[in-house]
Image: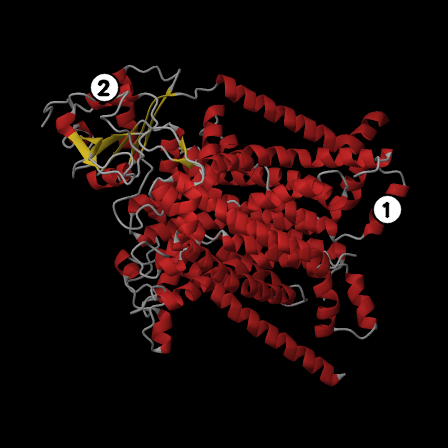
């Protein structure tokens, strides 16, 4: 008994330290191996003022439409994002920084916002060039819905580059009441699954030719 | 390090490594890995629209160093530091010394001085914008003037500096109070027997014994002031005509790396800043031995 | 002796005057926040300097509106937990490293310490994307660990504690060395208790920075029930846009726990005085 007491007095910090470290290591390893990390699809809806419940409903509907198994990968519809790159100082906020982080980490698949905002984001090169290889084929046929921008980077191109797809009047507005003034969808520059964007578009009832319009 | 270490020294070194290991490993993973990434990026042209980075050597450095905008931003940052660091420290020291005396309502004062630290940044920005407003602002109303506090390029840097001082006093004060508390009371008792009280005790005991803390605050505040960003972010927007004369170097970095998406160029600006601060820090560290009193 | 007492009293009065003026200056934004929270939107955006107080009654319902639209209990809980873990991690790692840098000799000490200084020189914005990627790869998005992640270690705190340890007298440790204490015991039983007030300062700083950290919770926690106060309320700013009264009501509710934490910490400060007997 005395011996245990002695050990506790002199080595408690060691015990706590090593014990804590071990628990932390197990915790990290557990998460690193057993949690769902990958996404089926990650979309950011910018400047949405509607309550979270609408977004949750949209997400559920999309999951059942696309038939995703969410125990394997996640679907994220992130409507907690407010910025406007088209106005002065409109990117001076934390939302824009986290948006940039999402794009550059490659997590972001699609972004929906107003046309002016999307063009401004596109100019900085954060969106996928829909006419460039290897994804040009995927977006072939959507030309009459394309939204173009002229990039800042003159070396890339001095001609307009398609960076968005006009989805005004889609189910996003008709069914969920979002973006009554029209919206444009862009694809993240480093996306890993652009095919899913097509699925999202079909879920929103947008088709290459005419569609709902 | 030429001579062989004794057993005791070796043992001490082992403990030293053990104690710094968690911090160093954490810093390498959390901060230095991203920093090396930034260094690499500064030699690259950022690939827009999902293309990879292209190695371009020193092109970015040439562009950054030849633009007058960069030097202006660096000069703006230095001007800001010249206002914020000395004023913020002197006022905070005065308050900390007052609050360390036996004085009624001490904890109330301390809590009040702490409040600006936790106040919502939006509230802070609103108040200052209102105070500085040209037409309706409190300052212009009181003095009967029509000064454009934050959009006149000649004055704006001072106005921003004042907000900086205001928001940093609380931080410095908390540190000073901590430092004051570590001064053993017997020093003052001994001094009062020799007849040193009040102002003289302050200069002969408090200041020398507080010098490590003061040096620490000076060092960290210089670094903090030179990397100032949030303040500009809140108060200045792009339409402000005074912006070129006020924007700090990190603000410039943000405009390039985040708003315009040119990370290579932004990374180069960061490198210029880091090298500049390193030089200043090196000089300060050399000075430390001279100005700081060690018992 | 009569003149001495009078002089003392005058000094006290001057001190109070200085402190009251400073308090007033420091309090303005806070008072502004609360007053705005009680106004109508019309009143809040009017810039006339004489419209400081609400005209059309005090609109306490702004607070009710905010309280109802957010699950404040969850937000408070997440925030306090995040602050708790960040403070524990920061104080623990920084005390150890600070002691080593301030008190022990080992090869490479100056080099390693210069790395600590370099970390403080780098603008924090460049860490965001790589750190997000790390958390994302670990599968820790939307978790407490993800929230605490950037605060596991602290360069600022290490430097602060190093300064604290350097200031302690040499003879203390030498006596313990003669008694046969090893480095670990010296650190734990003799030196660490003496740097209490530095540790409290670091605790306060870590708590404040963690509380104000808006960016990080916003990016790693997209769920409403895993995020923290600042990030949760940032959504409110977006949602209510220029509705300043609701925004300020939210901000006021957010600040309350921080004030409570500070008052608790402050007691610690006062006790620190009692043990070291510091007075001026």
Residue A183 at x, y = what percent?
19, 35
User: Which structural element holds mark 2?
Assistant: loop
Report the residue marked by disc 2.
Answer: A138
Residue holding disc 1: C174
Q: Are marks 2 and 1 in contact (CB under 8 Å)?
A: no
In the image, taking residue C15 as reference, residue C244 lies left or right, namely left
Chain bearing mark 1: C
Q: How is the image coloured?
A: secondary structure
**Residue A47: image location, x then y, percent:** 27, 40
Q: SS class of the residue under badge 1?
A: helix
Q: How many marks?
A: 2
List x then y, in percent, for residue C79: 49, 40
Location of the C terminus of chain B by quadrant is bottom right
- Residue found at x 39% / y 52%: B67
Residue farthest right in this picture: C178
Measured Cα–Cα span from mark 2 to mark 1: 74 Å
Most distant residue in the bottom direction? C3
Residue C223 visible to an observer of this rendering: no
Q: Is residue B279 above or below residue A40?
A: below
User: Which chain is home to disc 2?
Assistant: A
Instruction: Tell me the mark number nearer the camera, choosing from 2 and 1.
Output: 2
**Residue B203 numbered mark, or none:** none
The answer to whether any part of residue C28 appears in the image is yes
Q: Nearer the viewer, residue B42 or A72?
A: B42
Relative height, residue C239 to residue A184 (above, below): below
Task: Provide residue C72's location: percent of width, then percent of height.
Answer: 42, 41
Quadrant in which residue B159 is drawn = bottom left
Which image quadrant is residue B133 in? bottom left
Badge 2 and badge 1 both on one subunit: no
């Amino acid at each position: 008994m005395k011996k245990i007491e002695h050990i506790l007095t002199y080595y408690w910090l060691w015990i706590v330290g090593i014990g804590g470290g071990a628990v932390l290591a197990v915790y990290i390893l557990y998460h690193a191996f057993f949690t769902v990390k990958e996404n089926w699809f990650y979309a950011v809806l910018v400047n949405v003022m509607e309550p979270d419940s609408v977004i949750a409903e949209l997400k559920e509907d999309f999951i059942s439409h696309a038939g995703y198994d969410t125990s394997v990968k996640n679907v994220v519809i992130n409507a907690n994002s407010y910025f406007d790159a088209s106005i002065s100082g409109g990117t001076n906020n934390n939302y824009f920084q986290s948006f940039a982080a999402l794009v550059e980490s490659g997590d972001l698949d699609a972004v929906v916002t107003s046309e002016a905002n999307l063009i401004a984001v596109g100019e900085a090169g954060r969106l996928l060039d829909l006419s460039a290889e290897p994804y040009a084929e995927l977006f072939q046929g959507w030309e009459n819905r394309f939204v173009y921008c002229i990039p800042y980077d003159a070396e890339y191109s001095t001609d307009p580059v398609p960076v968005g797809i006009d989805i005004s009047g889609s189910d996003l507005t008709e069914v969920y009441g979002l973006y009554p003034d029209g919206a444009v969808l862009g694809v993240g520059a480093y996306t890993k699954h652009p095919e899913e964007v097509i699925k999202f578009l079909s879920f929103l009832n947008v088709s290459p030719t005419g569609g709902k319009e | 390090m030429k001579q062989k270490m004794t057993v005791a020294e070796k043992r001490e070194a082992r403990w030293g490594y053990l104690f710094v290991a968690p911090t160093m490993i954490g810093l390498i993973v959390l901060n230095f890995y991203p920093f090396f990434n930034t260094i690499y990026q500064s030699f690259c042209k950022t690939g827009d629209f999902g293309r990879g980075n292209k190695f371009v050597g020193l092109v970015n450095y040439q562009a950054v160093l030849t633009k007058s905008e960069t030097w202006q931003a660096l000069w703006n940052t230095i001007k800001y530091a010249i206002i914020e660091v000395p004023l913020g420290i002197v006022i905070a020291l005065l308050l900390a010394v007052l609050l360390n005396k036996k004085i009624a309502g001490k904890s109330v004062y301390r809590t009040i001085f702490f409040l600006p630290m936790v106040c919502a940044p939006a509230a802070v920005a609103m108040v200052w914008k209102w105070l500085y407003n040209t037409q309706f602002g409190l300052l212009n109303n009181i003095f009967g003037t029509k000064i454009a506090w934050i959009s006149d390029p000649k004055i704006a840097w001072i106005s921003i500096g004042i907000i900086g001082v205001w928001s940093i006093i609380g931080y410095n004060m908390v540190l000073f109070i901590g430092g004051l508390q570590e001064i053993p009371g017997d020093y003052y008792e001994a001094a009062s027997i020799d007849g040193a009280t009040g102002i003289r005790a302050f200069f002969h005991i408090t200041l020398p014994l507080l010098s490590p803390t003061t040096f620490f605050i000076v060092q960290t505040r210089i670094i903090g002031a030179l990397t100032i960003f949030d303040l500009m972010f809140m108060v200045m927007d792009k339409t402000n005509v005074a912006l070129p004369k006020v924007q700090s170097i990190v603000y410039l970095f943000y405009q390039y790396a985040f708003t315009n998406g040119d990370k290579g160029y932004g990374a180069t600006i960061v490198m210029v800043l880091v090298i500049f601060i390193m030089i200043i820090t090196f000089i300060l560290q050399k000075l430390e031995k001279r100005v700081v009193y060690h018992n | 002796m009569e003149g001495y007492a009078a002089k003392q009293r005058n000094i006290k009065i001057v001190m109070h005057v200085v402190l009251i003026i400073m308090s007033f200056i420091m309090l303005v934004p806070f008072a502004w926040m609360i007053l705005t929270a009680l106004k109508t939107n019309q009143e809040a955006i009017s810039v006339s300097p004489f419209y400081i107080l609400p005209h059309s009654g005090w609109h306490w319902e702004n607070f009710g509106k905010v309280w109802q639209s957010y699950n404040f209990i969850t937000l408070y809980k997440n925030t306090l937990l995040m602050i708790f873990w960040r403070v524990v991690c920061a104080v623990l790692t920084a005390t150890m490293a600070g002691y080593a840098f301030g008190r022990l000799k080992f090869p490479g000490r100056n080099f390693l310490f210069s790395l600590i200084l370099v970390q403080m020189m780098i603008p924090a914005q460049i860490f965001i994307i790589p750190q997000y990627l790390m958390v994302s790869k670990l599968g820790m998005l939307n978790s407490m660990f993800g929230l605490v992640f950037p605060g596991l270690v602290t360069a600022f705190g290490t430097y602060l504690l190093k300064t604290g340890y350097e200031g302690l007298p040499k003879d203390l440790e030498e006596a313990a060395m003669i008694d046969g204490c090893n480095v670990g015991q010296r650190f734990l039983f003799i030196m660490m208790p003496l740097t209490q007030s530095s540790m409290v300062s670091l605790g306060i700083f870590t708590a404040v920075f963690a509380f104000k950290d808006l960016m990080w919770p916003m990016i790693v926690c997209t769920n409403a029930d895993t995020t923290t106060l600042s990030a949760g309320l940032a959504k409110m700013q977006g949602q209510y846009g220029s509705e300043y009264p609701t925004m300020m009501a939210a901000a006021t509710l957010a600040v309350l726990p921080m004030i409570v934490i500070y008052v608790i910490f402050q007691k610690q400060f006062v006790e620190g005085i009692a043990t070291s007997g510091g007075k001026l």
